[in-house]
Structure formats: C-alpha cells, structure tokens
Amino acid sequence: MLKVAVVGATGYTGVELIRLLLRHPEVKITTLSSRQYADQNIAHIFPSLAGHIDTVCAELDLDALAKNADVVFTAVPHKTAMDVVPELLKRGVRVIDLSADFRLQDVDVYQQWYQAHSCPELIQDAVYGLPELYREQIKGAKLVANPGCYPTSIAVALAPLLRRNLVVADTLILDSKSGATGAGRSAKTASLFCEVNEGFKAYAVASHRHTPEIEQVLSEVGQKEIKVNFTPHLLPLNRGILSTCYATIAEDVTSSQIAAAFQDSYANEPFIRVCPEGQLPNTAYIQGSNFVDLGWVVDTRTGRVIVISAIDNLVKGAAGQAIQNMNIMCAFAETAGLDVVPLFP
Amino acid sequence: MLKVAVVGATGYTGVELIRLLLRHPEVKITTLSSRQYADQNIAHIFPSLAGHIDTVCAELDLDALAKNADVVFTAVPHKTAMDVVPELLKRGVRVIDLSADFRLQDVDVYQQWYQAHSCPELIQDAVYGLPELYREQIKGAKLVANPGCYPTSIAVALAPLLRRNLVVADTLILDSKSGATGAGRSAKTASLFCEVNEGFKAYAVASHRHTPEIEQVLSEVGQKEIKVNFTPHLLPLNRGILSTCYATIAEDVTSSQIAAAFQDSYANEPFIRVCPEGQLPNTAYIQGSNFVDLGWVVDTRTGRVIVISAIDNLVKGAAGQAIQNMNIMCAFAETAGLDVVPLFP
Amino acid sequence: MLKVAVVGATGYTGVELIRLLLRHPEVKITTLSSRQYADQNIAHIFPSLAGHIDTVCAELDLDALAKNADVVFTAVPHKTAMDVVPELLKRGVRVIDLSADFRLQDVDVYQQWYQAHSCPELIQDAVYGLPELYREQIKGAKLVANPGCYPTSIAVALAPLLRRNLVVADTLILDSKSGATGAGRSAKTASLFCEVNEGFKAYAVASHRHTPEIEQVLSEVGQKEIKVNFTPHLLPLNRGILSTCYATIAEDVTSSQIAAAFQDSYANEPFIRVCPEGQLPNTAYIQGSNFVDLGWVVDTRTGRVIVISAIDNLVKGAAGQAIQNMNIMCAFAETAGLDVVPLFP
Amino acid sequence: MLKVAVVGATGYTGVELIRLLLRHPEVKITTLSSRQYADQNIAHIFPSLAGHIDTVCAELDLDALAKNADVVFTAVPHKTAMDVVPELLKRGVRVIDLSADFRLQDVDVYQQWYQAHSCPELIQDAVYGLPELYREQIKGAKLVANPGCYPTSIAVALAPLLRRNLVVADTLILDSKSGATGAGRSAKTASLFCEVNEGFKAYAVASHRHTPEIEQVLSEVGQKEIKVNFTPHLLPLNRGILSTCYATIAEDVTSSQIAAAFQDSYANEPFIRVCPEGQLPNTAYIQGSNFVDLGWVVDTRTGRVIVISAIDNLVKGAAGQAIQNMNIMCAFAETAGLDVVPLFP
C-alpha cells in the first residue's frame, strides 16, 4: 500500500481528498496535518467521515511527514504551499500540490497576478497535472501542480478545437459558474448561507487569478499566444462548475469537424463524457465524480460555437484530479479510487 | 380607482401581478380569470394572499371582463394571448400583454421562432413596453407588449453603449442566468425541486425564442442589424436574472465614455441603479423590486467591456414592468405601487 | 414624522428594520449606528437598500441619538443591550429592545440562562411586546422587550388553548425549525453556505435560551407553572420559523372547542391568519410579512392536538413585531408600514 | 455474479438502486423495467449514469424477468406492487419490495390506511427488512418488505429504549423532516422547485400512512400496543430524514442506562453511528451512505429524552437498506456495495 498524507486536511478540498482516498484500493492515509484543528480527530471535525477514519490531525512536521508518506497532497493556500513543497521534495517525497504556486511556468506572470515567488527554480520541475493533456509528463513527475478548477473545466472544453485550429483564438469568451465550495471554508461574511442562498453574482471580473493559468494552457495547446475573457460567477449550490465557452468558428470549418475533434480527442478518456446529441451538461449529473461532461452547439447564424463543460469542482476540479495524477505517477489504474457513480439527485 | 383584471391569474406572473396591484394606490382588482382554477378562491390557491384578497377565479368571460375592467393584464402563454387580446381591444379595454405575441414587429420573424400568427394586423399597434427606451410611445398605447424577462435585462444593459456606438455591434455575447420561476408553474418533471436543486445547466442554446426579441430591440437602438449569441441558463433559486454581456469596445473609446453613457442614460430613471465603483450586481439585492442593477468592467487586456445586469424576473422582468407600463398609460406616478424596498436576505 | 434610530443597523434584524421603516408612512430614520461598519454608507453594506436611503452608519453616540430620535430600536446582542438601553431611557427616548435582556421578569432566571444582569431594576418597567397578548400594557410603555422569534411563534400558537384550559399543561412539546437568518450575520464556520445548505439538524436541545422565555409567557397565560420541551432546528433557507406544538387535550374537550378558541382569540387580529380547514401553514407563504399563519389537527387516536404556526423570523419574529409595538406605543394604525403582501415564491 | 433486476427503475429510488448496485462487487444488473420510459436508455434518462451503464428500459415482462434475475427489486408504488410481487415469487425469484404492500402484518390495518389488498395470504411470508431488528429472519426470506423511510429512522432511534422499558410507551411524539426526494419523481405542482424551495411545512399530520408501520414495529419491540403521534415535514433539500423523537423517561431510569442501551444495541452494527458526546446528527453528514446517525439528550427538567436520528432517505431509507437485505439474503458481506463515505458538503 502506498502511504499518503494530506497537508491542509480540514478545508473542503482536504475532506474530499480523504473521502476519495479512503476508498482507494492501493493507498493508506498515514498523516493528516492541520494548523487550525491540530490534535482534533478528523471525524469530529467532519462527522461524515466517522466510521471510516479516526486519525487525529497533527501540526505540520516535515520530517515525520516525509518518513510516513510516499506521496503528499498539499491542500494549503498559495504562498503557504511554496514554503512547504520544497521542503517535502528535499526529503524525497513526491508532492501533488493543489495550490496555484507551481502552475504558472513564467514566474513573472505568477508574480504579477499573485505575489513574490520564493522558489522560482522549482517551477520548471513541476508538471501541470491535467492528464488529458499532459499524461506522459505526469508519469515521471516528482512535483505535480494540480490545475485550478476553472482552468480544468475550460481547457478540457476547448483543447480539441484549439489544437486543430477550428476556432479563432482571439475570440474566446469564457463564462464560468461555480458552486460555493469553491470559495473555501474560511469564515467570511460573504460566504455565509444567507449571503449566498437565493443570490447569484459575478466576481473578480477581468481580474481573477485563474486567467493567466487558462491563457497558459490554451496558448500551449493552440500554439499561439491567447488572451481570453474569463468571468467567474458564484452559484447557490455546493458543488459544480459549469463553463460556457464562446468562440468564433474558423473559416470553412464544419460542424462535423467540430464533432470529430471532440470524439477523436476523448473517445478513450475514462473521465470525459461527451453528451449525446440533443443533451447538454448539467452540474447535477456529475456530483461526487471525476467526470467532465461536455456538450456543444454550433450557431450558424453567428458563426460561433458554444462549448459547455460541467465538473465537480472538488473532484475533477481538485481532489479527484489530484488522485488521478497520483494514479498516473504510481502506475496504478488511472481510475483506481475514482470509479464513482455520481450522486443524483 | 382604476379597475383592472388579470387573465391567467394563477401562474407565477399572475400571483406577482396580484401581489403588486394589491398595494397600488390607484387601482382595484375586479376580476381574476383562470381556466385551471375556475371557481376557486385565489387565497386558497396562493395562501400568501390570504387576508388581502379573497376573489374567486372565474372562467374567461370577455364581456364581463370588458365591463368590469379598464385595463387588463393578459398573463397567458403565447398563442393563447393572440386569441384573447384582440377580443379585449375590440371591447374597448386597454391591454398589457405579458406574452410574446405582440413583441416582434416582423410577423415573419415571429412565425419563424414561434408559430403562425392569427392577427398580424394588431402587431403594428402594439407598443413594446420597455419604459426606459419607449416611454413616450407607451403613454398613448392601447396595447402594450410587455417585454420578455431576458430581453429586459439585456436591453437595459446595452442600450447606452449601442446608442452611442461605443461597442462593436457584431461582437455581442449575452450569457444569462434565470431563477426557476422563469420556467413557469406547470407540472413538468424538469421543473421538480429535485431536478433543479443543486444543479445548473444551459438550455435552448442558440435557439431560445427571446433571441429575435433581443435582436429587434438592440438593432433598433443601435440603428443597424444586430445578431447576438444569447445563452440562457437555469439557476437553482426562485427569483432573479443576471445577464453577463460581452462586447468589444469600439476603437478609441475610453472607459470614461462608457461610464458617462450609463450615467447620462439612467441618471433620472427611477428603477435603474448603477452600482457604485467596485460593486457589481447580485440578484439577491433586487428581490421583489422593480429595480435593474447595473455594473460593468472594462478589460483593457482584451479590449472588451463586460456589462452585468440583475433584475427580478417576476417584477422588472414581468409583473412590475407591466404595472410600470400601466402607470405611464394612465398618467399615474411611474413608481406608484412599485416603490418597494427589496427583500434581503 | 416620528424620528427613529436603529442601534445595531448592520445585522439581519437591522437591515430588516430599515427595509420596513423606509415604507412606514409616519416615521423618518434619522440615525443608524454600527460599531463594525461605522462611517460606511448603509446602501454600500446592503445594496438592496440603494435608491431608498444613503445614511452613513455612525459609532454609537448616546447624546446624539437621544437628540435625533424619539424612538430607538436596539438590535444589538444581549449583554450589549443592557449597557445601552438604560442610558437611552435616561435621556428620555422610548426604546424597543430586540435583545433578550429585558424579556425575563425573574432576574434569577435570566442570570441562570444568560449571565449577570447589570440593571435588574429596569426589568420591571419593561413590557413584553407581544401585542396579541399584551396590547394594553404596550400602549404606555417606555421600554418594550421585543419577544424572541421562537417564543412568538409558540405563544401565539398555544395561548388560546392554555387560557381556556383546553390542554394539559405539562404535556407541551415544541418542535421548532428556523431559517438561517436566525443564526445572525456574524462570520462563523457553522453558518457558511456549504455547512448549512442541504443539511438539517437540531441544536441547543433542551438548553436553548428561549426556553425560559417560552415558559414565562405560557405560564402567565395558563396561570400555572409550565415547563416545556423546546427543540430548535436549523433549516436550509433564509427566512421562516415553523413550530409544531404538541399537547394532550384536556378531558372532555371537543374539537369544536379548540376551533372556537382560535377563532375567538384571533378573529380581529390583523396579523394572525387562521388557515382554512384542510390547509396548514407553510413558511413560504409569509415571507417578508408580519403574519402568523396558524393551523391545527386534532388526533383523536392519541388524544393530542398538534398546533402549527409559521412566521417570518425577521418580521413577526423581530423587526415587524418591533414596528407593531412602535405603532401601538405611538397610537399609529397598528398595521402602518406592515401592510405587506408576502412574497411568493 | 448474482443477477438482479429493478422494476420501476426510473423513480428516485430506482436510480439510487442502480447507482449502488453498479458498485456492488457481487451483482450484475440484467434488467431494468419502466412503463413510462420503456425503450429508452437509462443513461439518457439519468445522465448521471452515463459511462457506467447503458441498459435500455423494458416494459415489465414477468417471464423474461424471472429468467434473467435471481433477485428482483420492486420499486413501484403500493397497489402496483401487490400485482407484480406474487407473480415474481411464483416464478421462483426472490423479491425485495420497496413498496408498503407487504409491510403491515395485519391486513385490516393495511386496508384501513391504504386500500383493499389483493393477496393477503402473502403477507405472512414477508419479512420486514430492518436488519438491525430482524437480521435472522431476513436470511431465509423469499420476500422482504423493505421498510419505509420514516419508520426506519424512528425504529432505529427508539428500539433500544423500548426493548428495555426505559421510556413510557404512550408518550411517544415523533417529529420527522424529510428531503424532497421522498415525495417522488412524478410531476405535481406541489413538488415544483419554486413551491418547495425556501419553504417548510408539515403534511399529512396525524394521517400519514407510515403511522401504522411505525406503531407495528415499535409495538413489537416494546411488547405492548403502542400508539404514536407522527408528524412528517417537507425540507427544501434533496436527501435526508431527521427524526426528533420525544419520550417520557420511565421512573428511576438514569442517563447512563439510556446511553448503555444505545451502546449495547449498536456497538457492532456496521451502519449505525452513535454520535460522540456533545454532537448531534445532521443530514448533511450521511448523504449517499447507508448510515443511521444517532444522538440523544436527556432533559432532567422535564423527565424526557429526545432521540435524534439522521438517514439518507434514498439509501438507508430505501435503496441502501434493500441492498443490505439482499446481502443478508445472499450471504454476502453485509456491507458489500454499501461501504460508502458520505459526500460532504
């Protein structure tokens, strides 16, 4: 059994990692660390876990962690991650980092959207952990930068079209909507039930930090510099991201070329479900699973294609994709521990 | 007191008309008609109304209606409306029609998106009831075609920019999200609580019937033919539409021109609230009111402006706007009966 | 115009007081105080209020307050209230206190369930502001202790039966469910959207501080010492309390005596709606209004009556009842500013 | 592999059976029947299932069913079940019936609360499938009557106390609250999103058909005739039942006897989690799992105990318990296919 640890176990991503790892046939959770809840039983913090685990959370102890874990998931905020990750790598463990700290390959871009980076030299070693695009590189990685939730939903939706030059690159408009777990578990007025329930809003318009990450992955796939409009919104529900992606179709491209692009790209992907004709994704149908549901409509009136993707932001958008990366790094079956049927309703 | 009647009183638009009319200082509800609930007390159907009204719903009787009402609100589905409205007009009452039947000035467009039209000659007499754009025409109208909820949210958001040619007309992408009252009160599986709750989806992508209505009003304001991408989505909440509207900014247009366009257009509009700098609309802040909340962000990286509007789809998107139209038609204070402070939370 | 002030304007009760007072024909809001949001425009804190008010919140200044207000609503936590209220009374203003500090007439009981009381001498002067039971006393009051939300929902439900000895006093079981606004607006993990949404729980079982208040009012009405089981629960919705009250029917009491008790007690009460036969209350039907909806079922199999009441916890359970008390104190029409049709859906 | 079929596959219980059976290591789904959706792919009806199953639903064909299945789950309404079940038994398959038709051992009681029973002779052969109480009898059963959701939540909560005579049997008051999946998937106005959302109500007060089932199981456990007050309520959430059960404590019974009753009864039960001291159940913590979470409070002021249980109504209240029964009937590990970590949030 592979020994794994979760640093930052008591956020929503942490508890989701635990939920999924507990059913993984090849791993054993050895350590859970949490600053805020040190010395508390994880099953008291999250009673959903009772009966499955009763590990007591520990303060972060790098040496103990390295001794007890082969792979560590770091589910801490950006900036914290860049302090912890290099120390873990130094001690010989492999790391899957769920923060933003090692996702952007250009440290200047990172520093412009986030803050100063304390270990820029590590960035080159990090592999961007989106298996549908970078599976080969992930296999040998020591450090995986697990993608952001929004970038995952968008990259999977647009990569087939960009790679084949089926759409005009500077026309991309990405309108995304996320459930409230995406805002994290810290106690802020804006995240209170009564502030979110029965409301809907856009936020961080034209300034969200996932923008450069989206542009990086789309530019790489499209092999040209791409700038996008990305607008995140907050949904009054727990889990799910739906991204509605608009692009002008390149000249002379047909609907069947677009359909073929999706079919060819994803026919063998275990976690990508292309909706049958006449259906479109709904976040209700992917809850708790690692699936990306994809659909699209070609609008011949305007010459645009609208691609829509749905993911569970805590699974394919965070914990599930992290485990998928671990599976690839460790040569487990890629679906091990992730072969979940979504909960509906 | 003006005598008013509601035809189709037992849908969500009907009950909202009743709620607002009951607090209107100048009117008296004389008749409520409903096929499905004929002979039932409206306060038994909607216990929210108990203590304020106990009118028994009647089958539609055109003569009785015309005798007892000066103004009739028709809140019936399209196609039904085109049968009822001409009969009412013939009998000398003024009509505010909340269906789509008299909104599209080009009957061919209507017939292409809806079905055959049985009284195309009436279309020319109908005034499109968006007061912020057509106040003068509404004053003398005998028949007002009350705008659709989505078109209202979008026209108010974009008219100031289109009228001044501040944006490129063929770049409009309109991503709208509506609460579930927008789907109506008929008993369909897709509208069940458990099918909508904790889910989010797009629907009628590139094919929603509000598209030609949006294009008509934007084309008229922009004085050129405009085609748009309009994508509606279903939110798991009762009330509210948020529209996120994308447009490429015309050459040499500055942020302050954009700001001035909104300020100048709406400074004296009683129901339009332009968000202060740094704030954006949230559907939670307009519930139960006739307000349109507006905000925008200029993205200098991409040269686009993102305009966001929030309305209560049952009020400014239906019943409230209908009453605003009645107020204008009858020379009441435009805010009479609509001077509501939104319910929050 | 009566000049009124709100101390503690930025909690959910505060914003609801403002919403209702803004539409009150006889009053003018002169001052809003808030420690946390001092010097901020109330319409920026609560954008729902924009267009109706743009008062800047002030630090609490007792002298200024007393000078500018005839009546002050104190919507601050218990313990804070007992510091503020005596100072206001000394300065000659009338106070409607929405905290628990002056509700319990026995200071020992208060000190047992809350904490030490710093001005016990004032308790005797306070009138318990439940108009349906204590209207006469409220008329001349200088200090009204506005009832708790749960006690309001329960006292109105049971008073008609207890006063007539129709139920056995020591059999009362009160199972109440409240929307999340009842938990207040402070930023706590337990109140986050994702902790409350899609969940339901009981809390403070057999230990909730409203218990002695419920017992006090029921004992007074029933003219004997009454102890109850009161169990509050948290609902995943914004507004509303539904209380399900169980009592064993006294010997030889008939169903029609029970029906008569409710009809006789409440026939002339403007805010109490007794459901017609075959209907029971639903919190969805009282939103935003000061109504109490009441229904009951006599279970002849078990000899018990189940009385069910629904209120909006922010209106009849807090702000609305406070204004009702003000109306009585100031000899305004009792429904002034409260003649609201509930928002549905 | 055991061959299983689901009759009535397209209700919420049906899709939940499929979800769980798909992950069961010992079974294979061979047939799904549905009148309404015959000839449609189950993964088109419920896109959540896509990628896991693509069985086409069939009209009910008893011979085909009996040929292709060893065990059949009948998830059809009562009355329909009593037509189907005998035919299946005749053909030699074992049946787990999720309707009410074979739960009540006294056919007169059944006929009083439901309607005429067409095969009363079968009732004696049916085993009431609540494993925590009747595990031994289930082992050899040909027909299991799977318990109702409310009775499950209540029987597990009270059996330890009734069996030991720790509470007074005629004082039981059972206040239950259920998520909206409990109302089923048929298209009724009362089940629409906007009718349920932001509302809360009691229904079928003193007349719900689960009442005699609750009384039957409690009477059997308590070895005396027991009558109860049972009040169901509708929660605005998808999944979960929370039952708040009140009972007067028998004379001289101590808190530690009560605690011991729960600990002794359930220490070895795989699906019952007794909350640690200071915690109480929340439906948010059992979603998607077969757990029953239990907590209680002794109120020494009133001499009552309040026992609270939480289950997922679709799992332990329906599909999960049915599979637990199948596991027992087939000598599989009792937790096979049910070893799920609840989804939170």
Image (spheres, coloured by chain):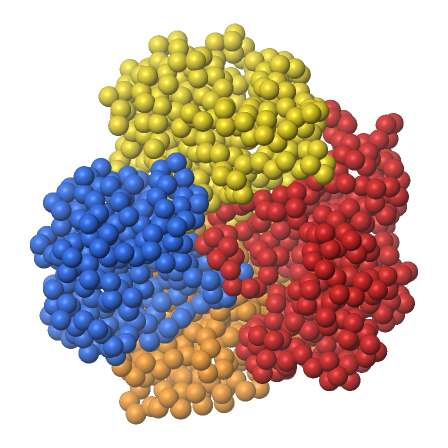
Chain colours: A yellow, B red, C orange, D blue
Residue B220 x, y percent position in the rendering: 86, 48
Q: Quadrant of the image for the N terminus of chain B?
A: bottom right
Residue A155 x, y percent position in the rendering: 55, 26
Q: At 63% across and 20% down in the image, what residue appears?
A: A165
Nearer to us in this view, C249 or B222: B222
Residue C167 visible, this angle: yes
Nearer to us in this view, D178 or C147: D178
Does B52 sit left or right of A143 as displayed?
A: right
Q: At 61% across and 31% down in the image, what residue appears?
A: A255
Residue C226 x, y percent position in the rendering: 35, 76
Q: Can you say whether D249 is above or below C40 in the image?
A: below
For the view shown, which residue lies furthest in the top direction? A121
Does C202 sit left or right of C84 as displayed?
A: left
Q: Quadrant of the image for the C terminus of chain B?
A: bottom right
Quarter residue A30 falls in: top left
Q: At 52% across and 40% down in the image, what residue appears?
A: A277
Quarter residue C16 falls in: bottom right
Residue C341 x, y percent position in the rendering: 64, 71
Q: At 83% across and 65% down in the image, what residue appears?
A: B122
